[in-house]
Image (spheres, rainbow, N blue to C red):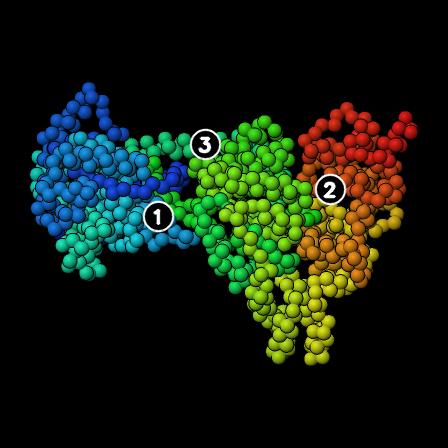
């Protein structure tokens, strides 16, 4: 047994041949290893960016008429080179096998000629055998089409089964293109066969149904053409060609079968599939039979060459391929150079500035739970949403709904589960490599009152741009921001209009696909900043600005509560580009989806209950008229926390009668469970006023300083005797606040925006609702910051990011000024001496000021105490300095 060097079939071999030559298996293995090495090299490279897809007109194939004289561009010698003259002389004496094969094909396959000639030469069918002029015209047109067009296969969120076959076909393109270009005028009939894949690619790209066996055969034939081109060069176009006369007739037959297979594919894929050649084709093995016949003839030709010549030709072919690969290496080097440029200092600094202002936007998305299957479909399955999603132009969708109805869970599912993305598979003429990419880039920002940063439109735009610039598919868009960053520096992150111009430029860039921006909980954006964002969006989407939006595909999906001021703002948008989706109109569907969550969760949290009691609990929850996702989450967790308390039937009845009917009732019940309510109030004050979410370690120290009546003597005292053990503090928070406060990624935050609103409500009810004010909360945090920064054993300025030694130092240094000026005036007067000490620029200010002004990108060197106090508006401190000096 031996292996044919290209095909993958095992064939018998006579004993005489086995004695004269080494096994064909060795040659096949070498061929396979070489291909794998080339494939690995291409995987390490980058594909050229896809350009806009043209409508592909029927390309043409390439026949020629004169004796073969093949030279590869990458290997061609100069005109005066002796070796070049020798090769030309040998080529002119070589038999024109391809012309003979083409003539044989036209003679043997008469039924295929009508479709073949029509596809090759356009609308005008050639009845007689085409002459040299017609063939060269067709060949030239094919090359123009291959240089200027690309073929794209689009799929929505799934791969296609024929990916492997397509990649084999693309390999043939990569190999054949340089040879076709060099043979345009010297070896036309060979160029015709080598151009087979280019000829068929428009039909393959536009065909609704792809035949895997047909494509596999096409790829195998391309590999055989690649192999036999190298064999011809080392045998029939060498100074030993007289030894291979017996090979000519079998090669003519083999090459004619190549033409016939391509003609069959044309007839199969063209719109005129009623040709006579296809009347009897019904069997499923048609393509494999054709390929088997080709392989048998090819293997017969291999035996005639001799193993020694096969090995020599393979080496020649390897060298030829290496030369072709060198030209591609130049392109890869160019892409590598572009990648290195992305690491330049100006781009790195821009991304750093954007990231600092954007904050941990991914964390705020992930705070929300993953949707239960079957929920959120009140939007996802609605025809209006689907129409908006499929709309190719810039547009805006506003989804409004009341609190606790799952808007943020919906936004998270749109981002994580991919219903907004479109995936494409593209073949570009510059690389001949298939690339799979998404046409849609989804960016997002979740506004959260009390979250890190200013929670304004500038922060949201910084987050959107940061995501665009770090995505592999859109990282090149960073070039549209570099000039503005060079002009404004870090202050660019504060300029909303400049940030918007950058985003708009990215959306209108020639090679940019669709950009979808998801802004969740816009009602939690700062009011003045939100109004500015509305003005920008209205201008962009207004009728007067349509010219600027027609060239872009910039979409916004915005969620919020249905507040009157937001509704008024959205009314100013043109109806053609702005769609309102009111979740309150879907209240019945949302209640049914909440029932799905009840069915999914109740069996899990009541697994120790009797089945009848489980049923009773489920029905009771579904009977609640004003149920929301938030209410259900709170209620189920209250049941889950104490399962052992409800073992008897009477206990279950007591449980059901005590379940809260509203979210506010649930909040009141959760906080009332605290056994040390003074500490609970102190912790809630801290979380209300905090300028960003505190870590567990920061909250631990802040709470200690808030509840201790005596000022601590040192940081060592706090660590040794006042703080709760770090490993236990999470459970301390749970015991004090229950579900009212969540801990995610070691950071504390309220379970929902309604929790903050509950504490600050203007109407006080019960022990907790409306019993907090921001003035009181700022006083609590201001005291903790002042006391911490004045501890005698905290030496030296804080280093950003280093919180191991002094966990609360960075927060206190950055935030104490805002807390001091935001508290009650009586409390500010009480701690005016503490603030005065912190404004001593030669002493205590060195602990916190360097870090504060570094974050603000400002210098304060040389400032006096009065200047520092005046800068922050510390009126009490300024008064003391003026009186004393």
Q: Position of residue 265 (x, y in %)?
A: 21, 50
| Viewer-nearest of discs 3 and 1 | 1
Write down the quadrant of residue 769 in the picture: bottom right
Classify mark 3: helix, strand or loop. Answer: helix
Q: Residues within 10 Å of mark 3 (few under 14, many from 20)?
A: few
Q: Which of marks 3 and 2 is nearer the N terminus?
A: 3
The residue beneath circle 2 is 811
C-alpha separation, residue under disc 3 versus residue under disc 2: 39 Å
Would you say 820 lies left or right of 275 here? right
* Residue 338: assigned label: 3
Q: How crowded is mark 2: few (under 14 residues within 10 Å), some or many (20 or more)?
A: many
Quadrant placement of the C terminus:
top right
Classify mark 2: helix, strand or loop. Answer: helix
Camera-side residue of 436 and 406 = 406
Classify mark 1: helix, strand or loop. Answer: strand
**Residue in view at x 72 percent, y 34 percent:** 851
The reply to whether the C-beta atoms of the residues labelled 3 and 2 are less than 8 Å apart is: no
Q: Position of residue 752 (x, y in %)?
A: 67, 55
Q: Earlier in the sequence, mark 1 or mark 2?
A: 1
Camera-side residue of 217 and 869 = 869
**Residue in view at x 34 percent, y 38 percent:** 431
The residue beneath circle 1 is 153
């Amino acid at each position: 047994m031996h292996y044919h060097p290209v095909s993958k079939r095992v064939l018998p071999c006579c004993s005489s041949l086995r004695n004269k030559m080494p096994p064909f298996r060795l040659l096949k293995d070498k061929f396979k290893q070489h291909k794998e090495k080339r494939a690995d090299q291409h995987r390490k490279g980058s594909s050229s960016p896809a350009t806009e897809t043209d409508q592909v007109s029927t390309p043409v194939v390439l026949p020629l008429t004169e004796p073969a004289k093949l030279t590869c561009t990458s290997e061609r010698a100069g005109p005066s080179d002796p070796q070049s003259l020798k090769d030309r002389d040998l080529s002119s004496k070589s038999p024109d096998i391809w012309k003979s094969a083409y003539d044989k094909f036209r003679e043997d396959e008469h039924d295929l000629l009508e479709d073949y000639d029509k596809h090759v030469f356009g609308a005008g069918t050639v009845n007689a055998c085409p002459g040299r002029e017609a063939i060269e015209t067709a060949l030239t047109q094919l090359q123009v089409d291959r240089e200027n067009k690309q073929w794209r296969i689009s799929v929505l969120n799934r791969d296609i089964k024929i990916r492997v076959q397509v990649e084999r076909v693309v390999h043939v393109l990569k190999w054949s293109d340089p040879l076709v270009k060099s043979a345009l005028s010297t070896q036309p009939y060979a160029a015709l066969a080598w151009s087979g894949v280019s000829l068929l690619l428009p039909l393959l790209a536009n065909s609704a149904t792809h035949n895997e066996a047909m494509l596999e055969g096409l790829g195998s034939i391309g590999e055989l053409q690649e192999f036999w081109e190298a064999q011809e060069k080392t045998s029939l176009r060498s100074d030993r060609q007289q030894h291979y006369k017996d090979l000519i007739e079998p090669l003519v037959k083999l090459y004619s079968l190549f033409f016939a297979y391509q003609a069959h594919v044309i007839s199969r894929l063209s719109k005129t599939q009623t040709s006579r050649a296809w009347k009897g084709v019904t069997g499923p093995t048609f393509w494999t039979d054709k390929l088997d016949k080709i392989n048998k003839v090819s293997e017969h030709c291999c035996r005639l060459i001799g193993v020694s010549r096969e090995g020599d030709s393979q080496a020649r072919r390897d060298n030829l391929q290496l030369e072709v690969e060198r030209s591609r290496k130049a392109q890869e080097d160019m892409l590598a150079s572009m990648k290195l440029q992305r690491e330049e200092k100006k781009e790195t600094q821009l991304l750093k500035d954007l990231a600092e202002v954007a904050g941990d936007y991914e964390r705020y998305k992930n705070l929300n739970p993953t949707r239960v299957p079957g929920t959120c479909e009140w939007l996802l399955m609605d025809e209006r949403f689907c129409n908006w999603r499929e709309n190719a132009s810039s547009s805006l969708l506003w989804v409004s709904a009341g609190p606790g109805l799952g808007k943020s869970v919906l936004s998270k599912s749109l981002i994580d589960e991919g219903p907004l993305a479109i995936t494409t598979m593209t073949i570009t003429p510059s690389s001949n490599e298939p690339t799979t990419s998404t046409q849609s880039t989804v960016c997002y920002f979740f506004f959260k009152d009390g979250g890190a940063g200013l929670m304004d439109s500038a922060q949201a735009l910084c987050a959107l741009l940061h995501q665009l610039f770090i995505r592999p598919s859109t990282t090149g868009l960073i070039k549209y921001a570099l000039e503005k960053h060079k002009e404004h520096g870090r202050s660019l992150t504060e300029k909303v209009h400049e940030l918007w111009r950058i985003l708009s430029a990215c959306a209108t860039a020639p090679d940019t696909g669709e950009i979808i921006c998801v802004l969740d909980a816009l009602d939690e954006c700062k009011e003045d900043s939100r109004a500015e964002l509305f003005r920008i969006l209205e201008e962009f989407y207004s009728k007067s600005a349509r010219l600027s939006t027609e060239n872009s595909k910039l979409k916004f999906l915005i969620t919020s509560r249905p507040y009157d001021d937001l509704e008024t703002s959205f009314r100013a948008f043109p109806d053609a580009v702005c769609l309102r989706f009111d979740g309150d109109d879907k209240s019945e569907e949302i209640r049914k989806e909440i029932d799905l969550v009840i069915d999914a969760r109740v069996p899990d949290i009541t697994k120790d209950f009797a089945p009848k009691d489980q049923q009773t609990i489920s029905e009771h929850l579904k009977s609640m008229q004003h149920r929301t996702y938030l209410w259900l989450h709170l209620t189920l967790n209250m049941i889950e926390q104490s399962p052992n308390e409800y073992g008897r039937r009477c206990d279950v009845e007591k449980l059901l009668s005590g379940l809260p009917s509203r979210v506010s009732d649930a909040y009141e019940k959760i906080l009332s469970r605290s056994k040390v309510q003074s500490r609970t109030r102190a912790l809630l004050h801290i979380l209300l006023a905090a300028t960003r979410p505190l870590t567990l370690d920061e909250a631990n120290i802040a709470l200690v300083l808030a509840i201790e009546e005596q000022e601590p003597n040192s940081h060592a005292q706090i660590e040794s005797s006042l703080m709760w053990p770090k490993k236990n503090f999470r459970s301390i928070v749970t015991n004090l606040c229950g579900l009212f406060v969540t801990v995610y990624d070691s950071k504390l935050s309220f379970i929902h925006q309604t929790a903050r609103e509950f504490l600050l409500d203007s109407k006080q009810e019960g022990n907790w609702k409306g019993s907090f004010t921001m003035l009181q909360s700022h006083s609590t945090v201001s005291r903790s910051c002042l006391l911490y920064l004045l501890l005698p054993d905290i030496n030296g300025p804080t280093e950003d990011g280093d919180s191991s030694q002094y966990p609360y130092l960075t927060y206190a240094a950055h935030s104490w000024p805002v807390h001091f000026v935001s508290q009650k005036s009586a409390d500010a007067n009480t701690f005016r001496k503490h603030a005065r000490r912190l404004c001593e620029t030669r002493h205590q200010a060195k602990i916190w000021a360097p870090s504060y002004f570094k974050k603000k990108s400002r210098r304060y060197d040389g400032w006096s105490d009065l200047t520092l106090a005046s800068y922050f508006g510390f009126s009490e401190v300024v008064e003391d300095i003026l009186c004393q000096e």
